[in-house]
Image: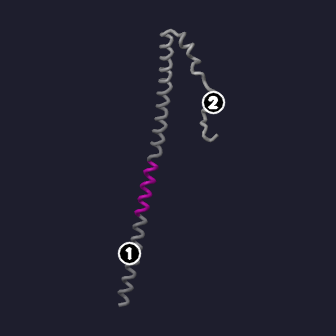
Amino acid sequence: MGSQHFYENKIPVDRNLFLPIINKMTRLQYFVGKSILIVGCILIGVPAGILAGLIYFFRVALTYPFQMYRIANNQWLKKVELKQEDMWERHIQRMEEEEKYHKN
């Protein structure tokens, strides 16, 4: 049961179902039918591709500035934290030096 694929349970399609119809067509009817399919695919596929591209473009265009701001802000915060740590280390070092100086 686990090794079965989802398409194994479907009703089989007779692939020769359309052969009698195609065999009765003239070359012109066959060519026109294929041409209509090709033009239909183009008329549906091109706008769908453009729409998908526009959706992706706007998604990236709207989120990119916020991502860059977040990255820059995180880098700035790390830099400030390092400076703060450095400042406290210098302060502690100065205090220890002053203690040594006053003891002598």
Residue 73 drawn at (x, y percent): 44, 57
Tag on residue 90? 1
Image position of 69 with respect to 43: above or below: below
| Residue 62, x across and y down, in percent | 47, 43
Q: What residue is shown at x 57% (from left), y 21% (from top)? A: 15
Tell me which corner region of the image, top left, top right, bottom left or bottom right, holds residue 102: bottom left
The residue type indicated by label 2 comes to Lys
Along the line of sight, the residue nearer the viewer: 20 or 92: 20
Which secondary structure lies at badge 2?
Answer: loop
46 vs 8, nearest the viewer: 8
- Amino acid under label 1? Arg
Looking at the image, residue 1 sits to the left or right of residue 42; the answer is right
Where the C terminus falls, by quadrant?
bottom left
The kind of secondary structure element at disc 1 is: helix
| Relative image position of residue 1 (x, y in whole percent) | 64, 40
**Residue situated in front as seen by the camera: 32 or 26:** 26
Q: Give the range drawn in magenta.
A: 65-79
Q: In which quarter of the image is residue 76?
A: bottom left
Badge number at residue 41: none
From the image, give the main secondary structure of the stretch colored magenta.
helix
In the displayed structure, 24 sits above or below 10; it is above
Query: Is residue 48 covered in magenta?
Result: no
Color theme of the render: one colour
Residue designated by label 2 = 10
